[in-house]
């Protein structure tokens, strides 16, 4: 449960008499009680704001620094984790860039999970490394490996749980303990679950990281990113970096995201329920090599997921089909309902081939080391019926298998030579 904070914006929040659920928080911003007020909050589509005189200091002065529409979204995202107002950015990677610039300097060291978004790996390896910031990538599902990677100059632990795209589970509380022992900070990318299904700050994280482009917006219309913390010093530093780099989210995208948030609890719970059913079906399918979803976790991973996740385990399912790279290509090309895109979190069911899309910039040996094979596919379950999604997957598997059988039956130059020798 959470309480809505007050702040000056283009809309006035309901004054709460008691703590609200996440479902109500997602709906409350923009709702007003005065006669004639709009039900949906207006957009402050302005670059600058008026002053009554010299020396005045209004809350919003220039939209590169702050904007009423962005502030409304920031307030809501903070409320969802009982935290300070978030800092919102133009994209998720812009949020991560600001995080790293705010917390790190040349000579510092980062311990990062291997199973993170490919853009995060690229940012750390190809950009920050050139600025003198070293990163050690670890299997974050192994607490001992995380602890062993910590150095005297480690300033940040960065994890994503469930991991992208292998959906491995990392123990946030254990990582928090390791970070505190090292006088470092812990950041958790919570894009896949959102605050509806997981609240990293509750488990000891210092910063929650979001690409709001994904499930939070939910409709594939608004780019955005956000950082959420309960530490005012960290938040002030992040906002300063955002001011210096000009990476704030646009008012229109903030407004779109606010409207998308209204249905987030309903969407992600329904999608997660369907995803669990599909994961179990895939696990029984003879054409599938392996399936990854927290609902299928065993042993310690299951215990951690049950402790960290709020009721459900997310709408993303990853799986490997039998065959090779070409088999994976034939499978996705045969899909009719599921759409091939480099994206997750929309109301439509989406599929991604990480090796050639999201993680194409990651060297192949590194991809293989974290379980991103050439036949791994990432399914972001939408709001279509469960039966229709399964039927589409089934017919695509059959089409891919038929193509493989036809190809193997065609004579090759080598097979012709063997026949001639006989």
Image (tube, rainbow, N blue to C red):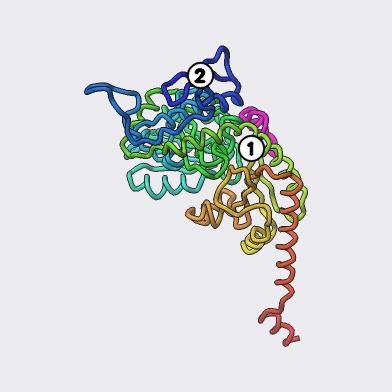
Query: Could you tell me how far apart the alpha carbons at marks 1 and 2 are, in whole angstroms?
Result: 38 Å
Residue 155 in magenta stretch: no
In the image, taking residue 156 as reference, residue 33 lies left or right, namely right
| Tag 1 residue | 314
Foreground tag (1 vs 2): 2
Q: Which residue is depicted at the point 47% across and 47% down? A: 119
x and y percent of residue 305 in the render? Answer: 64, 32
Residue with the most extreme bottom position: 420
x and y percent of residue 208 in the render? Answer: 49, 31
Of label 1 and label 2, which has the lower sequence position?
2
Image vertical order of residue 355 relative to residue 309, above or below? below
In the image, taking residue 64 as reference, residue 405 lies left or right, namely right
Residue 311 in magenta stretch: yes
Secondary element under disc 2, as helix, strand or loop, is loop
| Tag 2 residue | 34
Q: Which residue is depicted at the point 60% across and 57% down? A: 374
Image vertical order of residue 32 relative to residue 49, above or below? above
**Depth check: 223 or 47 in front?**
47
Secondary element under disc 1, as helix, strand or loop, is loop
Magenta span of residues: 296-314
The image quarter containing residue 215 is top right
Is residue 141 among what the camera can see? no
x and y percent of residue 331 in the render? Answer: 67, 59
10 Å neighbourhood of mark 1: few (<14), some, or many (≥20)? many
x and y percent of residue 243 in the render? Answer: 33, 34
**Depth check: 268 or 173 in front?**
268
Image vertical order of residue 218 relative to residue 203, above or below? below
Q: Which residue is depicted at the point 43% across and 21% down? A: 7
10 Å neighbourhood of mark 2: few (<14), some, or many (≥20)? few
Residue 149's disc number: none
């Amino acid at each position: 449960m959470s309480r809505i904070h007050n702040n000056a914006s283009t809309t006035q929040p309901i004054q709460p008499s008691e703590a609200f659920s996440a479902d109500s928080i997602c709906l409350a911003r923009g709702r007003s009680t005065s006669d004639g007020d709009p039900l949906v909050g207006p957009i402050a589509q302005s670059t600058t704001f008026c002053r009554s005189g010299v020396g005045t200091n209004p809350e919003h002065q220039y939209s590169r620094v702050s904007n009423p529409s962005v502030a409304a979204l920031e307030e809501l995202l903070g409320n969802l984790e009982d935290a300070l107002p978030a800092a919102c950015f133009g994209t998720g990677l812009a949020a991560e860039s600001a995080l790293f610039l705010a917390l790190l300097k040349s000579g510092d060291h980062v311990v990062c999970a291997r199973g993170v978004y490919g853009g995060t790996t690229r940012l750390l390896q190809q950009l920050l490394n050139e600025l003198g910031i070293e990163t050690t990538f670890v299997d974050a599902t192994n607490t001992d490996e995380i602890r062993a990677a910590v150095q005297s100059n480690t300033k940040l632990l960065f994890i994503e749980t469930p991991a992208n795209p292998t959906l491995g589970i990392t123990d946030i509380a254990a990582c928090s303990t390791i970070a505190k022992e090292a006088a470092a900070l812990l950041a958790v990318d919570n894009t896949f679950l959102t605050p509806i299904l997981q609240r990293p700050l509750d488990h000891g994280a210092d910063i929650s990281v979001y690409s709001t482009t994904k499930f939070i917006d939910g409709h594939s219309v608004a780019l955005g990113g956000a950082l959420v913390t309960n530490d005012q010093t960290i938040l002030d530093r992040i906002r300063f970096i955002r001011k210096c780099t000009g990476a704030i989210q646009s008012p229109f995208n903030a407004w779109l995201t606010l409207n998308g948030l209204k249905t987030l609890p309903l969407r992600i719970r329904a999608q997660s329920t369907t995803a669990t059913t599909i994961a179990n079906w895939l696990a029984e399918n003879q054409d599938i090599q392996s399936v990854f979803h927290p609902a299928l976790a065993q042993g310690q991973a299951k215990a951690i997921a049950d402790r960290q996740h709020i009721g459900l385990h997310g709408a993303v399912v990853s799986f490997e089909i039998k065959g090779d790279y070409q088999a994976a290509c034939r499978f996705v090309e045969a899909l009719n309902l599921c759409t091939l895109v480099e994206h997750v979190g929309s109301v439509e069911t989406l599929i991604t081939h990480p090796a050639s899309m999201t993680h194409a910039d990651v060297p192949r040996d590194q991809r293989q080391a974290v379980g991103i094979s050439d036949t791994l596919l990432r399914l972001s379950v939408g709001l279509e019926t469960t039966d229709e999604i399964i039927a589409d997957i089934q017919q695509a598997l059959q089409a891919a298998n038929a193509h493989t059988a036809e190809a193997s039956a065609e004579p090759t130059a080598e097979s012709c030579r063997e026949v001639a020798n006989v």
